[in-house]
Amino acid sequence: MPERTALVVDDEPDLRLIASMSLAIAGTWRVVEAGSGAEALELARTGRPDVILLDVMMPELDGLATFALLRQDPVSADVPVIFMTAKVQAHEVARYRAAGAAGVILKPFDPMRLAERVDEILTAGSR
Amino acid sequence: MRVETRLRTAAAHGGERFARAILGGPLAICVLTIDDQRFVEINDSFLLLTGHDRADVIGRTIHDIHLWVDAVEGARLHRAIRRGCQVRGRELGYHTHTGAARFALVCGESVAVEGQHLAILTVLDITDRKHAEEQAVLQARLQRNNTLLQALNRAQSEHIAELDAGSLFEGLLAQLVLLTESRFGFIGEVLADSGGAPYLKTLALTDTSNDEPSRALMEKHRRAGLEYGDMNTLYGEVLTRRAPVCENDAAGGRLGSGGIPPGHPPLESFFGVPLFGASRELVGILALANRPGGYDSPLWTELEPLLPVCGSLIEARRSRHLKSLAESARRESERQFRLLVDSVRDYALVMLDPFGRVASWNAGAERSFGYPADEVLGLHVSELYPPEERDSGAPERDLQIAACEGRLESEGWRLRRDNSRFWANTVLTPVREEPRLCGFALVTRDITERRDLARMKDEFVSMVSHELRTPLTAIRGALGLIEGGAYGALPGLVMELVSIARGNSERLIRLVNDILDMEKLEAGMLALGRSEIDAGRLVATALDGLRGMAGPAGVALRAKVPSGCSLGGDEDRLVQVLTNLVSNAIKFSPPGSSVEVRVEEGPGRIRFSVVDQGPGIEQKDLPRLFGKFQQLDSTDARRSGGSGLGLAICKAIVEQHGGRVGVDSEPGRGSVFWFELVPGGTS
């Protein structure tokens, strides 16, 4: 399987590392990290990722705002976005889905299964 | 020599001259036969007295000329004379020759003259004197009546003028005592005690004290009114017989029969009359005592027509008294109510008229809205709503709903006098005097602070949630990766340590989740989603998530769900509830046993039951189970790794769905944890 690129966006460096290392286990992912919404927009345009893992709670430009901007840019508009959030309320999850996200992964996640979950979401989305 | 002897001598010597002198005198004299009262001799004065002619009288009897008015009295007189009595000064009525009746004073005795028994009568006319006497009596009576009438008139006027009842009856009694020539008396009101037995309370009482201390005592009692309850007395007899009672026999014993207060002068005569009100109800009694010579019928006849007025006065006083008692009770209760309403400063307590205009306004309303009462009375309640609400007709709608439903509680913006807004909790209740609507009661509370607090808490919870979960994610993640062996194997003991750390980090995560859940549930901030849920899928999802736990524990998972059973609610949360209950069941089930989830449909409800074959729970522990931070004992806590909030959260979620939870368990018989939901789901 050709290597795919995942853009991991989170203002917490530790969590970026965990996510990267978790995805790397599957062996099919190359991970690019962004530490802010602004950085994410930049890297999304230049890096052309296959999926964006987007943290919701970020200072300055939060997840939803970043997502909106990603949509506006034709280069990144079609990239599937998975929200990563500690918020567990059903109505909040529904909000993200309604916004057009491919899926939502709740934090904390099982690192051994992260790659699997991302694949599930992407497969479900492409159907 | 004495005159009498001289007269006798003179009579013996000069009898005829003597006789002529006597017979010629002004005194009417007649001589009758003792047997048949035949006139033998009469003098000129007798003829003058009666107007008869000599010829009409001599030889005829007393009866023949109808001399005496009362023949019986005349016969008695004659009998007395025949017996040999000397009758002196007997008053008799006599007839003149025209038949006119007059009064005479008669003396008489028998004499024997020449062998003949005769009766000599002397008659003195006292008619004028008699008339004068009667006139005097009549005058006196008229005078008394007049005075009594005046007394009663005055009493009535005093009553109408609402003068002090005490002095009114005192004055009346004083007059009655005076006019009846009594020494003392009282006027009393008839009342009933709590048992219904009658007793008397004096309205007026004559002062019978004879020294300073007793006068002071008397004065004290008179004002308050003395109470007499002994019916075995003369006045008691008046009450029980409802008729006048008269007793003049001082020696008879009845007058000493008690009921008289100590120190009171003894009774020599008594006259008590009942007093009736307009409705023939016995309202009081007039008692008089110690009239010289006692009481008699004529006095009663005089008194009787005037008594109804006394009764009416007592009755009128009573009803006025009751009315004023009721009036002051009403005023007092109104005063207390006003005090209460005014003292409430945290709540706006407002009365609206049926059209929604402000009728009353308390201190709390002034504080919340900024309007003093005089500025806002009469304004329509819509003035207190923000303009956009006014335009949409919200105030009128609120009034309508309240009037129909009987109550409306709502939260919304209200407008202050300075046009600033505050978030208010309002309860609007219609006030009815069946079936008429007389207005509305409006209670408003400024909960801006509460709302702000709620918002702050929400933000806090969000922030805490994020702040706690972020590091936990990193810890859990890092440990998970190490444990997963993805980045190299570690010596067994090290792996064990890593496993412990990872497990406990998960425990922390669960605890954080539970606490935050509980926080939101309690604040009513846990927003539940609503969707159509298939019961079978719900159960399957929960059980699937727990196979990893049940397997190693050696516990079999079973489900018994009727097909096509669905309900409305928050699927994720209900999965959470089931997962919680089933995982508890697994924790407490011995290896080789099974845990079954049953779904049963009943009228208007769906019941989910989680049945285990564990040790069961003691009766005494059952009530605490669904409380917060409840673990039956700490060893369980450590073993099961629970936060103690699980069941509390289940209860809160189910109750927010409008359902209820419960448990049936007995030691040694396993447990059934159940919850019921309405098919419609969250309201």
Image: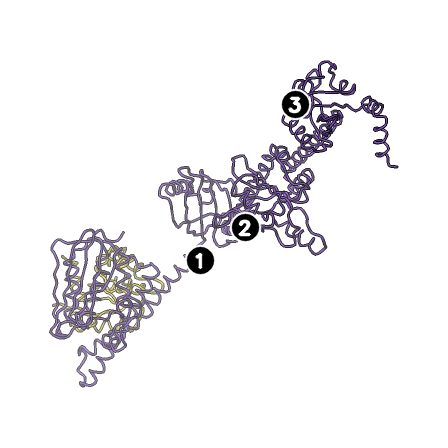
Chain colours: A yellow, B purple
Q: B370 or B602: which is nearer to us?
A: B602
B533 w.r.t. B140: above or below: below
Density class for disc 2 (Cα within 10 Å; few <14, some 14-19, many ≥20) is some
Disc 3 is attached to a residue of which chain?
Answer: B
Disc 2 is attached to a residue of which chain?
Answer: B
Q: Residue B143 carries which label?
A: none
Q: Are marks 1 and 2 on the same chain?
A: yes
Q: Where is residue B103 in the image (x, y as percent from the top left)?
A: 71, 25
Q: Position of residue A124 (x, y in %)?
A: 15, 59
Q: Mark 2 points at which residue?
A: B230
Q: Is residue B571 left or right of residue B102?
A: left
Q: Which amino acid does the dot numbered 3 rest on?
A: Asp
Task: Write the residue at 23% across / 69% down.
Answer: A109
Density class for disc 3 (Cα within 10 Å; few <14, some 14-19, many ≥20) is few
Disc 1 is attached to a residue of which chain?
Answer: B
- Mark 3 or 1, nearer chain start: 3
Q: Mark 3 points at which residue?
A: B36
B458 w.r.t. B476: above or below: above
**Residue B51 quadrant:** top right
- Mark 2 or 3, nearer chain start: 3
Q: Name the residue under label 1.
A: B449
